[in-house]
Image (tube, rainbow, N blue to C red):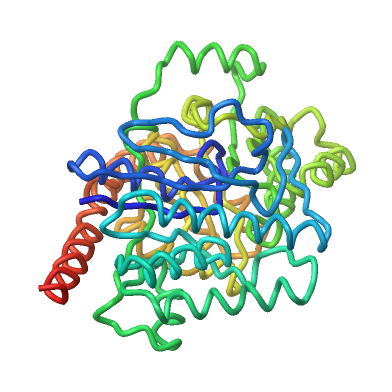
Amino acid sequence: MKILFLLTQDLDSPGGVGRYFPWARALAQRGHQISIAALHPSFDTLNQKDFEQDGVAVHYVAQMHVRKQGSRKTYYPAHQLLAISARAAWKLTQAALRIPADVIQVGKPHPMNSVAGLWARSRRGTPLFVDCDDYEMANLHFGGSWQQRGVRFFENYAPRHADHVSAHTSFLRNRLLELGVPEDRFTYLPNGADLARFSQVDPAQVERLRTSLGLEGKEVVAFIGTLGFPNHPVDLLLEAFQRVHTLRPQAVLLIVGGGEEYDRLVLRVQEMGLGGAVIFRGRVPGAQVPPLLRLAHVQAEPVVDNPVGRSMLPLKMFESWASGVPFVTGDVGDRRLLMGEPPAGVLARPGDAESLAEAILQVLSNPRLVSMLRARGLERAQEYSWERLVERMEAAYLQAVEKRRDRRS
């Protein structure tokens, strides 16, 4: 079976398409022919736009709707954004019409890839699948009302007119069913553990990193992801870490990732007097993320109990499980459900810096708890590996292809 992913993100960032590439790769490992047509945040700097990675054919076709340079993310003014988005939609549509596919999988129903997927289905009759892993209306940065209206339209329209829809949280599932998506055309697909990427890390590389960052003898609290509000309220983590550092001066906060709040957070750390205890690693290539995570004694995800928090399911949790790193987060959405019983992580009160600090301190001060969390996390990682999860989508793909074949005969 030939499956084409249409994506509006790049593949090489801790905050990039961590959901979609392991999904595509797992399908390729099951013998399917997988292609990805994607946008890139620095398209004009790419030396290689078409390549194969882990059995997946990747084609970068146009500039993303935001620009990333180093650790900083910037937004285009309205007049530029409209032209860039139109070109991106056209290039993705060309790819959807050109690349052979039995199924088209849209990752995030943004306007650009939704247009491409819907047009390709109308021209080629290819079954269209749409995956929702965000509540874009609540968490995107909008430069104008026209952009907000466009995102709202496609976030609602594309799932209703797709052959099949998937989402990774109960919040999004319920929203999609309320929009009119039939339950028999819906698959609950949580995020998964990318075992190939996070379980096979060279210990010598980890120790070299520890030395180069001056982390010998330190207790490392990590945050790896995009530095952007409201998705990731890292300012809440800074408040929590200030309390952690007061009680455990050997603790260090390692922040890996970039985004529009990068400079603001660096300034905030200085204002809080934490300059010597917080390390900003910046945006790094995806290959550097697994060894950096292995430096951590605990990874923390700050979260608030609101529609954004309930619509998200952090990849960080699954990556921590696969890496044997204890994970701390807020009790929001599906996090408790996915952690299992006994839980493979520590839950804090959402939006509460003091509770988040207590949860981090609980891990740092209790070796027995750490051992239990590692064991439970590794078990959950196997249960939620992408190799297992894609079986759900594979069955839906095959059913859609069979229906199309029946209609033709």
Tell me: residue 274, above or below residue 329.
above
The answer, for residue 335, to whether it is visible in the render is yes
Of all residues, the one furthest to the right in this rendering is 271
**406 left or right of 68 in image:** left
The answer, for residue 296, to whether it is visible in the render is no
Residue 146 image-quadrant placement? bottom right
Q: Position of residue 119 (x, y in %)?
A: 45, 68
Q: Residue at horizontal 56%, vertical 70%?
A: 135
Q: Residue at horizontal 19%, vertical 71%?
A: 404
332, 75: nearer the viewer? 75
Q: Residue at horizontal 30%, vertical 33%?
A: 55
**357 left or right of 147 in image:** left
338, 16: nearer the viewer? 16
Q: Position of residue 169 (x, y in %)?
A: 42, 68
Q: Position of residue 206 (x, y in %)?
A: 49, 18
- Total number of numbered discs in the rendering: 0
**219 left or right of 199 in image:** right
Tell me: residue 357, above or below residue 147.
above
Q: Position of residue 101 (x, y in %)?
A: 30, 54
Residue 152 image-quadrant placement? bottom right
339, 384: nearer the viewer? 384
**51 left or right of 136 in image:** left
Q: Look at the image and tell me in which quarter the C terminus lies.
A: bottom left
